[in-house]
Amino acid sequence: MQIIVYWGLGHRNGHGRAHGGVDVEGEDLAERLGRRGLSLAQTLAVAERVARALSALHERDIVHANLAPQQIFLVDRQLSHIKLTDFGAARRLGAAVPSVTRTTPEYMAPECVAGLEPPSPQGDIYTLGCVLFECLTGRPPYLGSTLVELFSEVVNARPRASTRSSSGLTAMPTTWSS
């Protein structure tokens, strides 16, 4: 697994995104999910690829700290060729956490929302679970009309079952048991 962390500005050019000064054709997972959801098999393939990338980061004591569909880039729009992007919130394990971080609130781990823990590998895995939930249901596990409401949901609630399944699953749980 090759990890290239480019600390700079990327841009969209209408057909892809610049990575390290090189235009890469494709789209991010959020764009893909906006058009259509993923099947269960496609979701599991994304899970495996992103988990491998996160594992490679964690083996090097790096936490992504902002995983979301927008940071999962599908090279040539292919689920088989994934790149993680936006390492603006990434940090080494044990590094000081700035008082303000740029993260995607819908995917933040509860311990980070509550300010109890800094970003961690466990938080990255939690956010991957949130992304996979969205791949299967068409929406993030927690929604709020305000940031305060959203954070309250993340810290205190269980994910609400979705009324639609973009994955072809015939039944989504309506309650979650401990």
Image (cartoon, rainbow, N blue to C red):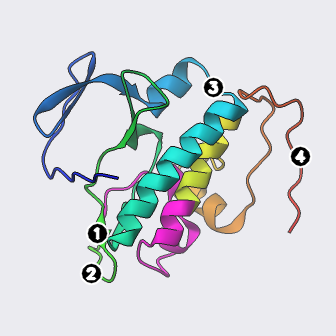
Viewer-side label of 2, 1? 1
- The crowding category of the residue bearing disc 2, from other C-alpha atoms within 10 Å (few below 14, some 14 to 19, many at least 20), is few
* Position in image of residue 27 (x %, y %): 38, 25
Closer to the chain start, of discs 3 and 1, is 3
Under mark 4, the amino acid is Thr
Gap between marks 2 and 3 measured at Cα: 37 Å
Q: Which mark is residue 58?
A: none
Residue 172 counted in the magenta span: no
- The crowding category of the residue bearing disc 4, from other C-alpha atoms within 10 Å (few below 14, some 14 to 19, many at least 20), is few
Residue bearing mark 3: 37
* Position in image of residue 21 (x %, y %): 10, 35
Residue bearing mark 1: 91
Closer to the chain start, of discs 2 and 1, is 1
Q: From where the camera sits, is residue 56 visible? A: yes
Give 11 or 156, whichever is nearer the viewer: 11
Gap between marks 2 and 1 measured at Cα: 8 Å
Under mark 2, the amino acid is Ala
> Residue at 47% of width from left, 70% of height from top?
121
Relative to 141, 63 lies left or right: left
Whether tag 2 and tag 3 are in contact, CB under 8 A, the answer is no
Viewer-side label of 4, 3? 3
Whether tag 4 and tag 2 are in contact, CB under 8 A, the answer is no
Give 50 or 171, whichever is nearer the viewer: 50
Q: From where the camera sits, is residue 105 visible? A: no
Closer to the chain start, of discs 4 and 2, is 2
Residue bearing mark 4: 174
Which span of residues is magenta-colored? 100-125
Residue bearing mark 2: 96
Whether tag 2 and tag 1 are in contact, CB under 8 A, the answer is no
Closer to the chain start, of discs 4 and 3, is 3
